[in-house]
């Protein structure tokens, strides 16, 4: 903060101007990333990890949350009964850029890709694990061992 004052007589201040420096775009970006990284978003059937107060090599060490003690076994999640073709369409769509690219890769139309994905989403909703977005389908596919994170 910069303060500039104009004095006319000793002890008297007639005008004061205050300029407040705005944070730079980089500073705002770092603050936003810090807020995002502090959030805890649990996945179904996976333990929730929170940041521990202990530091290891300058980084906070993850510790299991109180509700799920370390070493407990996660309950088995219900899995939808996807057909082989639905699994193939899902895996291909997750590995390529778009639905049209998935259709070209599998030699099927865009409508067929959409139909398969709609049925996959419906099957996940039926078992209580909705996946309305591509990111949610990625999470479900990883949880159900349909695709490995290294394949993405």
Image (tube, rainbow, N blue to C red):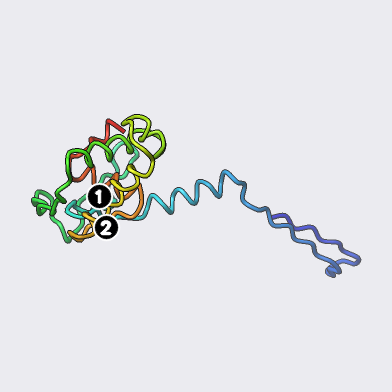
Q: Nearer the N terminus, badge 2 or badge 1?
A: 1
Q: Is residue 14 above or below residue 28?
A: below
45 or 5, which is in the foreground? 45
Circles 2 and 1 in contact, beta carbons < 8 Å: no
Which residue is outermost to the right?
Answer: 8
Q: Position of residue 150 (x, y in %)?
A: 27, 31
Quadrant position of residue 87: top left
* Mark 1 surroundings within 10 Å by alpha-carbon count, few (fewer than 14), some (14 through 19), many (20 or more): many
Badge 2 density bin: few <14, some 14–19, many ≥20, Cα 10 Å:
some
Q: In percent of the image, x 33 and y 42: which residue is there? A: 113
Q: CA distance from mark 2 to mark 1?
A: 10 Å
Q: Secondary structure at mark 2?
A: loop
The spot of residue 151 in percent (x, y) is 28, 31
Q: What element does badge 1 sit on?
A: helix
Q: Position of residue 49 (x, y in %)?
A: 24, 51
Q: In this picture, is 6 found above or below 37? A: below
Say which residue label 1 marks.
120
For discs 2 and 1, the disc positioned in front in the rendered view: 1
Observer-nearest of 145 and 24: 145
In this view, 51 is above or below 18: above
Instruction: Name the one closer to the observer, 143 or 7.
Output: 143
Residue 39: quadrant of the picture: bottom left
Q: Where's the C terminus, which quadrant?
A: top left
Q: List x then y, in percent, for residue 57.
A: 31, 36
Q: Which residue is mark 2?
A: 130
Residue at image x 23%, y 43%?
141
Q: Is residue 104 left or right of residue 137?
A: right
Q: Pick the quarter of the image with the N terminus.
A: bottom right
Q: How many marks?
A: 2
On screen, residue 59 versus residue 9, left or right, reads left
Q: Residue at horizontal 23%, vertical 35%? A: 148
Q: Where residue 141 is drawn, which disc sits there?
A: none
């Amino acid at each position: 903060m910069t303060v500039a004052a104009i004095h006319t007589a000793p002890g008297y201040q007639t005008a004061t101007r205050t300029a407040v420096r705005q944070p730079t775009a980089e500073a705002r970006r770092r603050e936003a990333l810090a807020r995002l990284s502090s959030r805890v978003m649990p996945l179904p059937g996976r333990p929730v990890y929170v940041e521990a107060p202990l530091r290891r090599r300058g980084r906070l060490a993850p510790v299991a949350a109180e509700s799920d003690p370390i070493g407990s076994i996660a309950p088995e999640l219900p899995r939808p009964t996807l057909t082989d073709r639905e699994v193939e369409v899902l895996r291909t769509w997750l590995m390529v850029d778009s639905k049209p690219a998935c259709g070209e890769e599998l030699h099927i139309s865009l409508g067929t890709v959409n139909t398969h994905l709609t049925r996959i989403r419906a099957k996940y909703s039926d078992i209580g694990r909705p996946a309305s977005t591509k990111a949610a389908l990625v999470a479900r596919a990883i949880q159900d061992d349909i695709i490995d994170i290294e394949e993405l």
